[in-house]
Image: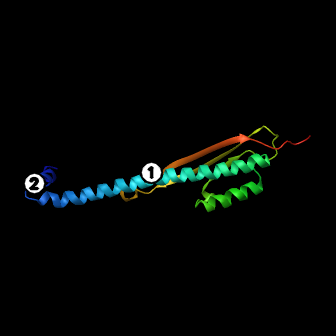
Amino acid sequence: MKKILYVLRSIKGEGMTITIPILILLFAVFTYFGLDVYGYMSTKQKIRSVASETLEIMKADNGYSYETEQYFEELARDYGLDPSQMIVTATPQRVQRGATVSITIQTTYKVLSLKPFGKQVTAEIDVFQSGLAHTYFRS
């Protein structure tokens, strides 16, 4: 350890040859981690947009149906998301007007910036949206 500190503090110029590549590596890792944070936030915003659009369809149809599921999957693909990696929980169709309809989407985001260090980290993304059904059914 003393030898490493001696080389780093040496005034002969030898220390900078080791310090500069280490600093560049650390800068690259922190920059890449910042991109991962941006990727996480961007993915969460995309899922929130897909959930919001799907909820509007659910409010008009009074719940989540097969057609709504197809719309959700198509919209997710349009946003660049993989619907097979998402868990969707929603209010089933045929609720009465004024009843609450909700959709919850869960997925994981893989943090790739720590992969060079041998770490596999995933972050959970949970999005919840709710609203009121619009159509009145006569009984």
Mark 2 highlights which residue? 10
Q: Nearer the viewer, residue 108 or 41?
A: 41
The residue that appears at 66% across and 59% down in the rendered structure is 75
Instruction: Kindly report the distance in space between the C-alpha atoms of the residues bearing marks 2 and 1.
Output: 37 Å
What residue is drawn where x is 39% and y is 56%?
Answer: 32
7 vs 128: above or below: below
Instruction: In the rendered structure, find residue 37 and report the number of the disc placed on it.
Output: 1
Q: Nearer the viewer, residue 124 or 79?
A: 79
Q: Position of residue 48 (x, y in %)?
A: 60, 49
Say if residue 86 shows up in the picture: yes
Labels 2 and 1 touching (C-beta < 8 A): no
- How far across and how far down the image is residue 31, in percent? 36, 55
Q: Residues within 10 Å of mark 1 (few under 14, many from 20)?
A: some
Above/below status of 2 relative to 83? above
Quarter holding residue 79: bottom right
Q: Neighbour class for label 2 at 10 Å: few (<14), some, many (≥20)?
A: few
